[in-house]
Image (cartoon, rainbow, N blue to C red):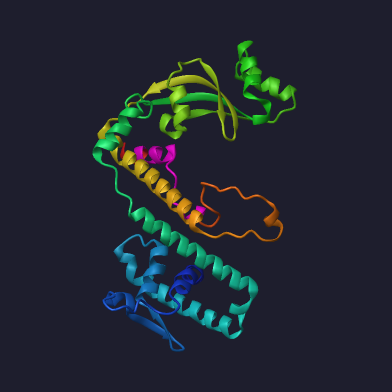
């Protein structure tokens, strides 16, 4: 796909979101409502151009002038296509209407979540230090593990795996036992930093020494893990602070959105129809479909891992 065609595709989102022109509210920035072109009388605004340029991810100011010219041309091409689609009444097609409504719902959901997230206070330095001190396995006693592990279906049962280990089985013997039993499993050997693990797992591994083998019961199944080698790599608070702040902020935003959703569901009148009317619907704490994708990302150990990688 050449650059111009790619920009035509990119501009669909920008033009669709701004198809009625720029922000005409009193006091709106002049650049936002500035008209950059008209296509059969339909205005294309600087705001739409900016949307396309943001999606292009311009590398430097040196590229900006050329990128603007290409982007404006792409917006014109896309507007011509949209106008013809409306003439052909494609906008009345049931599938198209459904897609437009889905896009509208997603945009509104994301905007609401962003507004809720923006109202959440940042964690104080004292709170950041408290988290740092509470999790030495991630920071002051941080370790890099060389592991040999098996991913085992939950149907096998953790006790059965532990029974094999109690008999002296190591990873090769466990793999042979699973194979003989006709059970599919995954095997991996590699390095893993503590902050890349679920917190509960990092805490367990932090108490093990080289040569130890343990069984972990995780939501997705069972893992048999042998510690082959341990390397200590502690991280100071000043080094980890940005990642800790980001993690705590994500946690707060997730909790705030969960609470908001619970309140909205509690005040909503939901009527289950058709085949769903016969099924007892239990209230859920997790976001409903459509809102879930807009929710601020739940804090994960990998948030810490990425942060530490960037600031080390």
Side (left or right) of 267 relative to 219: left
Determine if the magenta segment contains residue 306: yes
Residue numbers of the magenta segment: 292-308
* Viewer-proximal residue among 209 and 228: 209
The residue most toward the top is 167
The C terminus - image quarter: top left
| Percent coordinates x, y for residue 162 in the rendering | 61, 18
Principal SS element in the magenta part?
A: helix
Q: From where the camera sits, is residue 24 visible?
A: yes
| Percent coordinates x, y for residue 207 in the rendering | 43, 18
Q: How many numbered discs?
A: 0
Say which residue appears at 57% left-offset and 27% top-offset. Answer: 217
On screen, 132 above or below 75? above
Residue 102 found in image quarter: bottom right
Side (left or right) of 114 relative to 98: left
| Percent coordinates x, y for residue 214 in the rendering | 54, 20
Say which residue appears at 32% left-offset and 61% top-offset. Answer: 60
Say which residue appears at 74% left-offset and 23% top-offset. Answer: 181
Residue 194 found in image quarter: top left
On screen, 257 above or below 161? below
Determine if the magenta segment contains residue 240: no
The N terminus - image quarter: bottom right
On screen, 95 above or below 264? below
């Amino acid at each position: 796909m050449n650059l111009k065609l790619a920009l035509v595709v990119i501009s669909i989102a920008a033009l669709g979101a701004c198809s009625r022109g720029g922000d005409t509210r009193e006091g709106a920035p002049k650049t936002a409502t500035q008209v950059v072109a008209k296509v059969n009388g339909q205005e294309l605004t600087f705001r739409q151009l900016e949307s396309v340029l943001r999606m292009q991810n311009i590398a430097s100011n040196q590229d900006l002038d050329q990128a603007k010219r290409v982007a404006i041309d792409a917006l014109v091409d896309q507007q011509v296509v949209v106008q013809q689609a409306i003439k052909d009444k494609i906008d009345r097609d049931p599938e198209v209407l459904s897609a437009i409504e889905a896009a509208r719902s997603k945009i509104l959901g994301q905007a609401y979540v962003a507004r809720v997230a923006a109202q959440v206070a940042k964690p104080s330095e004292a709170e950041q230090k408290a988290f740092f001190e509470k999790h030495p396995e991630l920071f002051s006693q941080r370790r890099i593990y060389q592991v040999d592990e098996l991913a085992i279906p939950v149907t096998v049962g953790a006790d059965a795996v532990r029974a094999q280990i109690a008999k002296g089985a190591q990873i090769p013997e466990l793999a042979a036992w699973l194979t003989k039993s006709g059970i599919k499993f995954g095997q991996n050997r590699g390095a893993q930093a503590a902050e890349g693990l679920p917190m509960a797992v990092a805490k367990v591994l932090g108490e093990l020494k080289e040569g130890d083998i343990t069984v972990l019961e995780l939501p997705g199944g069972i893992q048999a893990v042998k510690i082959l080698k341990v390397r200590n790599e502690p991280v100071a608070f000043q080094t980890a602070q940005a990642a800790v702040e980001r993690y705590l902020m994500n946690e707060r935003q997730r909790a705030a959105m969960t609470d908001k959703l619970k309140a909205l569901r509690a005040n909503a009148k939901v009527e289950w129809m058709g085949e769903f009317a016969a099924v007892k619907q239990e209230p859920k704490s997790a976001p409903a479909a459509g809102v879930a994708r807009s929710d601020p990302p739940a804090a994960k150990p990998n948030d810490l891992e990425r942060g530490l990688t960037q600031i080390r």
